[in-house]
């Protein structure tokens, strides 16, 4: 009888941990994986948005940095970790039409 009572006492904790995992941890891991795949797929000519809100074009992809063009004359080096997202040009065109 003692073992059954212990199981019913610990069951709510197990359920809480499972809910916490499926609502918070798992979605965050999926988002991190998708962001890492996006960083790995960056190529010359891609348009990106940095964490500072700067919109730029990738000029050269290096190991842990990117060379990006801010305007016609300015090319700077950016750490990959500061890329927020990639701008999808084709999706923009569809929305405009």
Image (cartoon, rainbow, N blue to C red):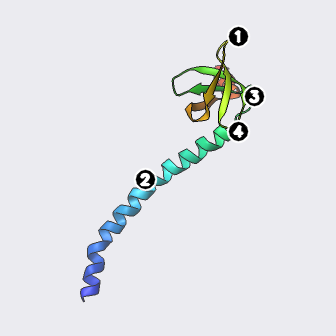
Secondary element at image label 2:
helix
2 or 1: tag closer to the N-terminus = 2
> Are the residues at dot 4 and dot 1 in contact (C-beta closer than 8 Å)?
no
Question: How far across and down, in percent of the image, does residue 17 sit?
Answer: 37, 62
* Label annotation for residue 40: none
- Badge 3: residue crowd in 10 Å (few <14, some 14–19, many ≥20): few
Instruction: Tell me the residue that label 2 is attached to.
Output: 23
Image quarter (top left, top right, bottom left or bottom right) of the N terminus: bottom left
Mark nearer the N terminus (3 vs 1): 3
Q: Is residue 74 left or right of residue 25?
A: right
Name the residue furthest bottom.
Answer: 1
Q: Secondary structure at mark 4?
A: loop
Q: Which residue is tagged 4? A: 41
Which of marks 2 and 4 precedes in the sequence? 2
**Which image quarter is the C terminus in?**
top right
Q: Residues within 10 Å of mark 2 (few under 14, many from 20)?
A: few
The label nearer to you, 4 versus 1, is: 1
Q: Residue at x 52, y 50 (%)?
A: 29
The residue to which callout 3 is attached is 44
Report the residue marked by disc 1: 72
Residue drawn at (60%, 44%), measured in percent from left and top?
Answer: 34
Q: Position of residue 88 (x, y in %)?
A: 66, 29
Percent across and percent down for residue 21 are: 43, 58
Q: CA distance from mark 4 to mark 3?
A: 10 Å
């Amino acid at each position: 009888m003692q073992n059954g009572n212990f199981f019913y006492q610990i069951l709510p904790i197990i359920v809480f941990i499972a809910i916490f995992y499926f609502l918070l941890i798992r979605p965050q891991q999926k988002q991190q994986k998708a962001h890492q795949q996006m960083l790995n797929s960056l190529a010359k000519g891609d348009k990106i948005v940095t964490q500072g809100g700067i919109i730029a074009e990738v000029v050269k992809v290096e190991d842990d940095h990117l060379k990006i063009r801010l305007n016609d004359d300015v090319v700077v080096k950016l750490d990959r970790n500061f890329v927020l997202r990639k701008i999808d040009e084709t999706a923009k065109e569809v929305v405009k039409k």
